[in-house]
Image (cartoon, rainbow, N blue to C red):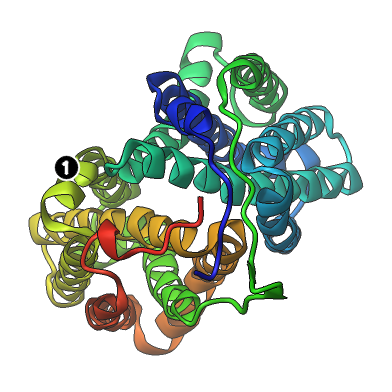
Amino acid sequence: MSSTSTSPPALTRRLASTRSVVAVALLFALNGLVIGGYGGVLPSIRERLGIGASQIAFLLFVAGLAGIVAMQVSGRLCDAAGARRVALAGLPLLIVAATTFALATSYPVAVAGAVLLGLGNGTIDVAMNAVGVQVESARERPIMSSFHALWSLGGFVGAGSVIVMARVLGLKGAAIVPPLLLMLAAAALVGFVVAVRITPHTALVQHRRNGVKAKIPSIAWLLAIMAVAFGLSEGTATDWSSLHVTEVAHVDSTTGSLGLVAVSGFMVLIRLLGDRLVARYGRRAVVRFGGAGAAVGYATVTLAGGVPLLLLGWALVGLGVGMIAPQVYAVAGHVGGGRVLAVVVTFGYAAFLAGPALIGFLVAHLGIHHAMAVPALLCAGIVALAATMPRSDAGLTRAP
């Protein structure tokens, strides 16, 4: 075994309890809430600080870099100190980051907020997945898709809060930044207090065999390649779907936004159903179907021109990519604990951030229609790479 740990029966029972499921779901939802709210209010932050696109890009870069660093550290800490502790340490960083952005009136303070946001997101991203994997292992049935669905729902609520608060309070532009982010910070703080009380203790994971530290298993790097493929594909869908529909179908931007609605809505839908699919068909089959669905979706948006077919294509992309990440992360956590999760999540996160910029370069040289062929090919590659995954959870070397 590449990874071992001690899980007393009492600990296993606590991890398998409904209370533990609620706790992990809460961590995912709170993370999505803060990140979604930040993304939704980012244009208003730009207006409040009077900054340009290059400065916004630097904020995103700083947050992404800090997140990648935090992922590497948190993965090892999850195994050595317990994923529960690390997850609960990451959430306050997100709360402080949201508060910092809410109060920021100068660009340097916003940069500090971006660093805190990246550190908090990177820390909790790996840790909450590590806790989720142990809960899934204790329950002996799939549940990771549901956790990721809660993240997506949290992000939807966070981003949607911008529109709701604007309508209810009549706030627009820069004026909405402080009340919105402080409200989200307060909600996250309440959730943190609850999470401290109900999040289960987790097993420690050791990476030693016969007294020698084991190498990272080779499957981790194959999972990381898959993470690059679905990270770029999901990032492209998130950042380019609305613009793609607008430009290709020659419609107004409001109608074009239906592209992202289709992606997000069907991604949540399939994640809510994903655990049942895994229980019936296995992770390998679900990932293969997800890769095939996303590839067909991207092929559709590459070839189609009318709004109905474009929306169908983006819905297939949402369905497809929504299936993949929970299963790839679950396998990573089962075979190697936080250490392997950190590797795989980092590759996926980096691709999610950098992918849309790469697609932007291709759009400039090939046109927005043809650029979508690249993620189509990557998703088709996932279908082939899924052959490296175990047929079922019985084939996994479980870390906890």
Percent position of residue 360, x then y: 48, 75
Q: Secondary structure at mark 1?
A: helix
Note whether residue 30 is visible.
yes
Q: Quadrant of residue 303?
A: bottom left
Residue 219 vs 336, above or below: the answer is below
Question: Relative to residue 229, is residue 294 drawn left or right?
Answer: left
Foreground pick, 162 / 289: 289
Q: Residue at x 70, y 20 (%)?
A: 182
Pointer 1: what residue?
A: 276
Label 1 sits on what residue type? Arg
Q: Residue at x 13, y 69 (%)?
A: 305
Percent position of residue 207, x then y: 64, 66
Q: Quadrant of residue 396?
A: bottom left
Note whether residue 159 is visible.
no
Q: Quadrant of residue 198?
A: top right
Percent position of residue 37, x then y: 56, 34
Q: Residue furthest top?
A: 168
Percent position of residue 210, x then y: 65, 74
Foreground pick, 383 / 310: 383
